[in-house]
Amino acid sequence: QVQLVESGGGLVQAGGSLRLSCVASGTIFRIKNMGWFRQVPGKTRELVARISSDRSIYYADSVKGRFTLSGDNAKNTTYLQMNSLKPEDTAVYYCYADIVTMAGWTYDYWGQGTQVTVSS
């Protein structure tokens, strides 16, 4: 079983910064992808950033130049540094990971979500 535990959400003024962390624990053979989605009530979940096992990183256009995703393979941890936050960044942020088992199967796991609120 795998668990993802997030931390670092909160309330911040526009222009401010927050750093989200996500730690994966449990039976992990290999992490294929790890990253963050966000969701606003009434809207579909949006991929914000993702780091892959080849170290390539994807960013949504809406966060490029403001958000930085990094990972610590040894700790199965990913960090999302969010700078120059805007009110439209307000959402519940979910950590996710594609975990590969020793048998070669890939499963998606999700954190419980952490609220990020940016006031104008």
Image (cartoon, rainbow, N blue to C red):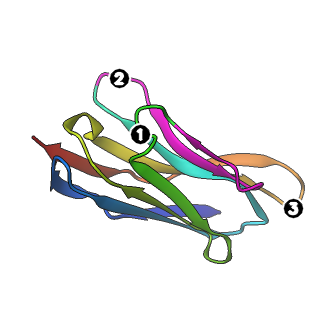
Q: Magenta stretch: residue 45 in it?
A: yes
Magenta residues, as a range? 42-59
Question: Which residue carries the number 2 mark?
Answer: 43
Q: Give, as a three-letter code, the residue at label 1.
A: Val
Ranked by sequence position, the earlier of labels 2 and 3 is: 2
Gap in Å between the C-alphas at discs 2 and 1?
A: 17 Å
Count neighbours of disc 3 (C-alpha within 10 A) and say few if under 14, some if 14 to 19, many if 20 or more.
few
Q: Name which residue lies at 29% across and 60% down.
A: 18
Residue 87, how many percent across, how many down?
19, 38
Mark 2–mark 3 contact, CB under 8 Å?
A: no
Gap in Å between the C-alphas at discs 2 and 3?
A: 36 Å
Q: Name which residue lies at 9% across and 40% down.
A: 120
Q: Is residue 21 left or right of residue 26?
A: left
**Label 1 SS:** loop
Front-most of 8 and 49? Answer: 49
State the count of labels: 3
Ranked by sequence position, the earlier of labels 3 and 1 is: 1
Q: Give, as a three-letter code, the residue at label 3.
A: Met
Question: Which residue carries the number 1 mark?
Answer: 63
Count neighbours of disc 1 (C-alpha within 10 A) and say few if under 14, some if 14 to 19, many if 20 or more.
some
Gap in Å between the C-alphas at discs 3 and 1?
A: 34 Å
55 up-or-down from 106: above or below: below
Q: Give, as a three-letter code, the residue at label 2.
A: Lys
Circle on res. 102: 3
Q: Name which residue lies at 77% across and 62% down.
A: 30
Q: Nearer the viewer, mark 3 or mark 1?
A: 1
Q: Quadrant of the N terminus?
A: bottom right
